[in-house]
Image (cartoon, rainbow, N blue to C red):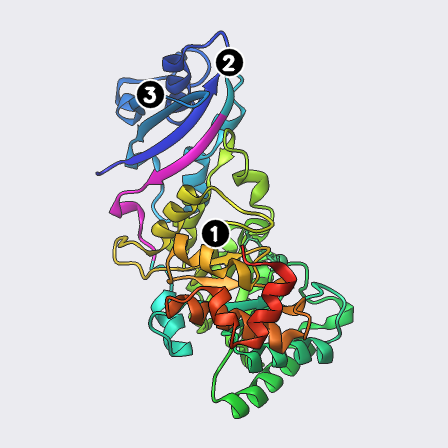
Amino acid sequence: MEDVTATYYFRPRADTTPEAAAQAIVEEETTGTWTDITTTTEYVRRLDGEVLSLEASGKGFVTRVRYPAEIFEAGNIPQYLSVVAGNLFGLARLEAVRLIDVDFPESLVPFRGPKFGMEGVRRLIGTTERPHVGTIIKPKVGLNPKDTAGVAYHAAVGGVDLIKDDETLTDQTFCRLDERLSAVMERLDEAKEQTGRQVLYAVNISARADEIVERAEHAIDLGANMVMIDVITCGFTALQALAEAQSVRVPIHVHRTMHAAITRNPEHGIAMRPIARIVRMLGGDQLHTGTVSGKMSHDVDELRGDNAALTEPYFGLKPTFPVASGGLHPGKVAAELTNLGTNIVLQAGGGIHGHPDGTEAGARAMRQAVDAFMEGVSADEYAKDHYELKRALERWGNR
Ligand code: RUB
Ligand code: MG
């Protein structure tokens, strides 16, 4: 395919036929507007869009449309989004419209993608097959640097592979980034001396666009081995700037706070898949895509497809490591892995720090739940001789 194809779900207004509604999308996003215009010339017409297919789906319709590649400025993601996910969302003739997926031709993927990707991150940890276990430090704000580092240390000794800041923690006065990062890295070194295992710490460098690369470089100078950015609030080009900076030689963990305002409504907005594709193109090494069950769970089929968009072959770009997070605990591990496979990072905040015996036991319980799954044993069975898992299942149940 030389051109761009985009798939939309929509529900037209009562006075609009589905054909006219689909046509309104391609016209608004290519050469047309709400009325015929006198300024169109013959040579402009080659940039017209085209409705490729239209069929009934649920309460509305699904259409696949073609946008000529020439409309797009190669490498300019804000411009791509202004076409495939632009004014169409406000068209009054559509009651609702959702961008489900988008396919770009190779000419419009001039990006290098992740520097590390899933394999690169696995190499840093030394795994080949098993899922990674991560934790978000909780409480999400309030702890001072020393206590933050203490929580990180216990999680590392308990066996997590990744520790991350929560999205609302950046560089506030109660926990300055410099001090926190230095304290955490020091305690992770201490944990490494004990366990022999290197753990990643994704320090949240989300900030003003013109400051992000600087913050990342500063963090790397202080010993950071991973950085985290919130891609929706910071913007796609902030991620691009970060990923393309030569100086940023650590993996980038991509969080997506605010995404649900865009992705959650099954009839209106933008599904996670186009966002996942863009994050991979721009160089996110890990990306949150959601969980099968948990406090913010998703449609399983959609989620599987989103993770596939991160990991399937795509113009030679490295796969991005999908992250399942939000309300997870050891009792939910088997269901996540059964549905999503083992190329995944399972993250638990409350599900580790809420363990009745504390963070270290919580981390052990998560790892035991993963080990049980990898050995083909049920969590209940495994808990018979794994005390931390037993305690977690008693607290939260096994589903
Ligand atoms: C989860 C958490 C993350 C969300 C993001 O904490 O802090 O911000 O998982 O969700 P807990 P998503 O484990 O205590 O629920 O990954 O769906 O964007
Ligand atoms: Mg969070």
- Residue 115: quadrant of the picture: bottom left
Q: In this view, does 351 lie above or below 123?
A: above
Q: Do the residues bearing badges 3 and 1 touch, measured as CB atoms within 8 Å?
A: no
Say whether marks 2 and 3 touch (CB < 8 Å).
Answer: no
Q: In which quarter of the image is the N terminus?
A: top left
Q: Give the range drawn in magenta.
A: 97-111
Residue 289 shows which numbered tag?
1
Amino acid bearing label 2: Arg
- Ligand 1 lies under 8 Å from the Cβ of mark 3: no
Residue 19 position within the rendered picture, expressed as x and y whole percent measured from the top left: 36, 14
Residue 310 falls left or right of residue 354? left
Q: Disc 3 to disc 1, how far (Cα)? A: 28 Å
Secondary structure category for the residue under label 3? strand
Amino acid type at image mark 3? Glu
Q: Which mark is residue 13?
A: 2
Question: Disc 2 or disc 1, which is closer to the eye?
Answer: 1
* Residue 71 is covered by the magenta coloring: no
